[in-house]
Image (cartoon, coloured by chain):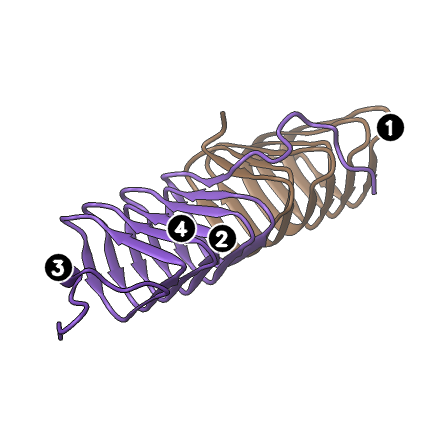
Amino acid sequence: MASTVISQGITIEGELTTEDDVVIEGTLRGKLVSKDTVKVETGAVVEADIAASSLSVGGQITGNVTATDRVDLMAGARLIGDVKAARLTIADGASFKGNVDMDV
Amino acid sequence: MARSSSTSHGETAVLGKGTHLRGRIAGDGDLRVEGTVSGDVALKGHLTVDDGAEITADVQARSVVVAGAVEGDISAVEAVAIRSGARVSGAIRGASISIEEGATVNGRIDADFELPPELGGKGGR
C-alpha cells in the first residue's frame, strides 16, 4: 500500500510535500511535490500542480505536471495543463489539453 | 462524475511518514497521520495521529487517538485517547477522554464526565 493515500471523500487544500509515493482517490487543491510515484485514480479530482518522479493519471487534473521520469495518461483520464516529462503516454480515451515538453 | 468502483472505498486515508502538509484536510472518512500537518483537520471519521507525527492546528473528528504530537485544540464527538509518549498542547474536548501514563498534556480538558481524582478532578486544582 502506498505510504500516503488521499482516499475518496477526503479533501486536502494546501501544499503536500513528500518523499514517498502518493495515491489520490479524493480531492486535492494546491500543490503536490513527491520524490516518488504519484497515482491519480479514477474519480479523483486534482486542482494542483504536481511534481513527481512518475505520474499515472486515471482521474481528473487541472494543473501543470512535471515528472523526472514519466507521465502516463490512462483511458478516462482528463488533464488540463502542461506536461513536462522525459516520457509521456496518452492512452486511447484519455483527454488532454496543454503543452508537452519532453526536452529534459 | 462517475465514482470509481475501487475496492478502496471507505479505506483510511494516510499521510505517510515522509509527508508534510501545509493546508487543510476535510472529509467523511478516516485519516491516519504519520507525517507532519500544519493546517486544520476536520473529519467525520476517525483520526489517528501516529507516533512521530506532528499536527500544528486544530483538529476535529468523530474520535481521535494521539500517539504523536498535537499543538492545537482537539475536538471529538466521541472518544479522545492520548497514548503514552504523546504530546498535546491545547484544549481537549470529547464525550470521553483518556490519557495514558507517559503522555504530556498542556491545556484544558473538557469532557462530559467527572474526572477521576488522579487526573485532577473533584477537589483537584
Q: Residues within 10 Å of mark 4 (few under 14, many from 20)?
A: many
Q: Amino acid at mark 3?
A: Glu
| 10 Å crowding of disc 1: few (<14), some (14-19), many (20+) | few
Q: CA distance from mark 2 to mark 1?
A: 40 Å
Disc 4 to disc 3: CB gap under 8 Å? no
Q: Which residue is mark 1?
A: A93
Element marked by disc 1: loop
Which numbered mark, 2 or 3, is in the foreground of this view? 3
Q: Chain of mark 4?
A: B
Image quarter of the C terminus of chain A: top right
Q: Residues within 10 Å of mark 2 (few under 14, many from 20)?
A: many
Tell which chain the image draws in purple.
B
Q: Name the one closer to the observer, A20 or A66.
A: A20
Label whose residue precedes the other's in the sequence (4 or 3): 4
Mark 4 or 1: the one toward you: 4
Which shade is chain A?
brown
Q: Position of residue B125 (x, y in %)?
A: 13, 75
Asked where in the image residue B5 lies, by quadrant, the reply is top right
Label annotation for residue A5: none
Label 1 amino acid? Answer: Gly
Q: Residue at label 4?
A: B64
Residue at screen point 81% across, 27% down: A75
How far is mark 4 from mark 3, CA to CA?
Answer: 22 Å
Residue at horizontal 49%, vertical 53%? Answer: B62
The residue lying toward the viewer, choosing from A70 and B11, is B11
Question: Which of B110/B91 is in front?
Answer: B110
Residue at image mark 3: B118
Q: Alpha-carbon neighbours of circle 3 within 10 Å: few (<14), some, or many (≥20)? A: few
